[in-house]
């Protein structure tokens, strides 16, 4: 089969013929129809992000495709089914605290690296092999619709955060980082889950206004000034009531004071979800007052990705019409132009923009 291969950090992807994956028990092989390109994929490939990725490798975290072959443990899947390929691969010998690898992207710790040795290659190829439990049925779609369904990979990240925080219909949410790719996805997911109000702080007034245009009056934009105390009060006023849940997905480049200003708007007994990157690139980490956390009974959830059943539940939200994939503006490239796709994704990583490779 044809695939895009990363042979060394800092080098372009090489498009070449490689052996087709071989099916094993507990596995499924999928013909890849469409796969998204992360906006920061160029930073992964350059080595700037220092992701745990053993080379050479076929990159690509998940995608949309059709089942090519199934193992004996699959009782619902059938050859030809349209499916979402979930890249979050978990070890099967510890249900309480499994090791995790993101297939075709990175791994967490020594256990994750060990897992990556087998479920190694990702979706920048004509075929990929996945654990059976990572292949989620979509129902009937057209080949053209596969491109837009790639947005599931972005939407699932904030969905996992809100599931961890047990977000309930009618609650008020603050999304810190709402003007970014994952943050804007968080706004749409929170509303789809029934949030009564979503506070969206940011400095880009054009994007803030666009969120209101897309989703209506339940979105409450707040323009940040850079003053921590002032910004905190602005966010609280915009909510017109207690903020039940704060979701942070700010990138590594952001000052911790911006995150703290948002986190400390949450009400007593409220929940905070941390899914961003503050402190990951060096520099100061997030400092929160111990007495404030204790006396206000604040629950803080650190969340990486999402639980195993999240993809199927999110697909149901889309099928119910509660979450719209047509918000996304998509640009597709064929596999031969994978390097151009990576460059395009880096230059067009804003809200509701999706770069896709169609092998």
Image (cartoon, helix red, strand yellow):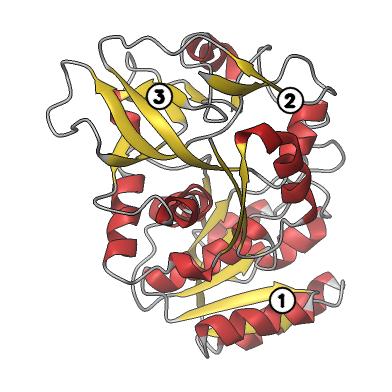
- Work out whether residue 20 can be spotted: yes
- The residue positioned 37% from the left and 9% from the top of the image is 22
Determine which residue is flagged by label 2.
13
Which residue carries the number 3 mark?
97
Occupied quadrant, residue 81: top left
Q: Nearer the viewer, residue 55 or 69?
A: 69
Q: Is residue 76 found left or right of 329 in the rendered image?
A: left
| Residue indicated by mark 1 | 207
In the image, taking residue 252 as reference, residue 296 lies left or right, namely left
Q: Residue furthest left?
A: 75
Circles 2, 1 touching at the beta carbon (< 8 Å): no
Query: Relative to residue 212, is residue 270 depicted above or below?
Result: above
* 190 up-or-down from 15: above or below: below
Among the 4 quarters of the image, the one containing residue 107: top right
Q: Are marks 3 and 1 in contact (CB under 8 Å)?
A: no
Residue 176 horizontal/vertical position (percent): 66, 64
Q: CA distance from mark 3 to mark 1?
A: 39 Å
Residue occupying the point 36% across, 79% down = 170
Q: Position of residue 234 (x, y in %)?
A: 72, 83
Distance from disc 2 to disc 1, alpha carbons, whole Å, reads 33 Å
| Disc 1, SS | helix
Q: Nearer the viewer, mark 3 or mark 1?
A: 1
| Relative depth, front residue between 239 and 141 | 141
Task: Give x and y (percent) for residue 328.
Answer: 55, 65
Asked which secondary structure carries label 3, the reply is loop
């Amino acid at each position: 089969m044809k695939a895009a291969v990363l042979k060394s950090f800092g080098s372009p992807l090489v498009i070449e013929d490689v052996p087709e994956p071989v099916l094993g028990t507990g596995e499924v092989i999928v013909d890849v129809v469409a796969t998204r390109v992360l906006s920061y994929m160029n930073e992964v490939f350059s080595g700037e992000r220092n992701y745990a990725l053993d080379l050479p490798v076929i990159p690509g975290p998940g995608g949309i495709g059709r089942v090519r072959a199934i193992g004996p443990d699959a009782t619902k899947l059938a050859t030809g089914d349209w499916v979402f390929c979930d890249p979050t691969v978990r070890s099967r010998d510890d249900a309480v605290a499994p090791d995790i690898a993101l297939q075709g992207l990175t791994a967490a710790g020594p256990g994750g690296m060990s897992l990556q040795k087998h479920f190694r290659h990702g979706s920048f190829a004509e075929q990929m092999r996945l654990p059976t439990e990572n292949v989620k049925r979509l129902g009937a779609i057209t080949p053209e619709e596969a491109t837009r369904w790639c947005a599931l990979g972005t939407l699932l990240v904030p969905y996992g955060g809100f599931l961890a925080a047990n977000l309930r219909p009618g609650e008020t949410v603050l999304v810190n980082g709402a003007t970014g790719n994952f943050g804007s996805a968080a706004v749409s997911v929170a509303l789809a889950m029934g949030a009564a109000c979503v506070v969206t702080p940011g400095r880009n007034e054009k994007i803030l206004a666009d969120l209101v245009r897309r989703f209506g009056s339940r979105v409450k934009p707040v323009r940040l000034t850079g003053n921590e105390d002032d910004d905190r009060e602005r966010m609280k006023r915009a909510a017109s009531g207690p903020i039940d849940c704060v979701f942070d997905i700010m990138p590594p480049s952001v000052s911790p004071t911006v995150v703290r200003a948002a986190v400390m708007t949450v009400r007593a007994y409220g929940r905070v979800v941390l899914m961003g990157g503050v402190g990951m690139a060096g520099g100061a980490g997030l400092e929160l007052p111990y007495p404030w956390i204790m006396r206000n009974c604040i629950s803080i959830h650190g969340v990486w990705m999402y639980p195993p059943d999240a993809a199927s539940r999110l697909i149901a939200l889309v099928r119910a019409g509660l979450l719209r994939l047509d918000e996304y503006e998509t640009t597709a490239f064929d596999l031969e132009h994978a390097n151009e796709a990576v460059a395009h994704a880096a230059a067009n990583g804003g809200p509701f923009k999706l770069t896709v490779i169609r092998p």
